[in-house]
Amino acid sequence: MSTEPKISIVIPCFNERATIRTLIDRVRAVALPAREIVVVDDGSTDGTREILEKEIKPLVDKLIFHDRNRGKGAALRTGFAAATGDILLIQDADLEYDPAEYPVLLAPILQHGADVVFGSRFVSGRSHRVLYFWHSVVNRILTLASNMLTDLNLTDMATCYKAFRRSALDGVTLTEDRFGFEAEFTARLAKKRLTFYEVGISYHGRTYAQGKKIGWRDGIRMIYAILRYNLFTR
């Protein structure tokens, strides 16, 4: 019997008909010893659901549909519950993050005993599309605020790319439905005094015209989540 850890790639998806097939093909192309692909469609209304049912279903291990849009955090909770791997890895359904970099993201867990790994868009020598100055400013402010309360020294708290041992979620109840997930996840796991690592990744950001979804309301929610889950939640 193989002793290689099983990697569950959890993909929340909402209105990504233009990218979902390419993304799945790229995920499947990555050589991993044992892999599980879990896709959670979060109430898509643009035809993504039909593509998932007709084209993607035979290509993934689990395909789950929400009856309505509930948010990225809610989709991730559904995916985490369905995943059976020893290590979980979050992958957005767009093409901003490159699955070819999974080995880089997983190496600290597989080789150095890390519990949690964040893929940073700000410490990498890899390619990075130049977009939205104020987004980067707000991201750094949110990361700084999170670091001040978690005592971590992350450079990119809100990154999509997070890989972690399943055991990191033991005793953790996640509640944020939208992008507040990023701050809640970081705060709750930091309180467990787990071993965090950060690695540099590339980033191929897209514009709002191309489908980018995060907005200023999500930034405000992240501030709320940073304060709530660090200061007022055990």
Image: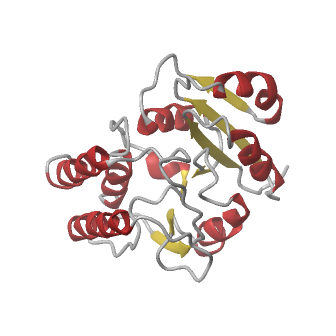
Which residue is the extreme one toward the front?
A: 209
135 over 112 or under it: above or below: above
Q: Nearer the viewer, residue 72 or 193?
A: 72
What is the image's colouring? Answer: secondary structure
Tell me which residue sits at (59%, 31%) in the image: 40
Q: Nearer the viewer, residue 232 or 157?
A: 157
Tell me which residue sits at (64%, 53%) in the image: 95
Q: Nearer the viewer, residue 213 or 110?
A: 213
Specify the quadrant of the image occupied by residue 134: bottom left
Instruction: Give coordinates of residue 31: x percent, y percent.
Output: 82, 59
Instruction: Give coordinates of residue 79: x percent, y percent.
Output: 56, 35
Q: Say left or right for 159 vs 185.
A: right
Tell me which residue sits at (57%, 33%) in the image: 15
Which residue is the extreme one toward the top?
A: 67
Please tell me how many numbered marks the rendered image carries: 0
Which residue is the extreme one toward the bottom?
A: 125
Q: Say left or right for 125 vs 61.
A: left
Specify the quadrant of the image occupied by residue 107: bottom right
Instruction: Give coordinates of residue 16: x percent, y percent.
Output: 61, 37
Specify the quadrant of the image occupied by residue 190: bottom left
165 over 139 or under it: above or below: above
Q: Say left or right for 228 vs 133.
A: left
Instruction: Give coordinates of residue 180: x percent, y percent.
Output: 32, 46
Tell me which residue sits at (60%, 41%) in the image: 11
45 over 196 or under it: above or below: above
Q: Say left or right for 65 vs 142.
A: right
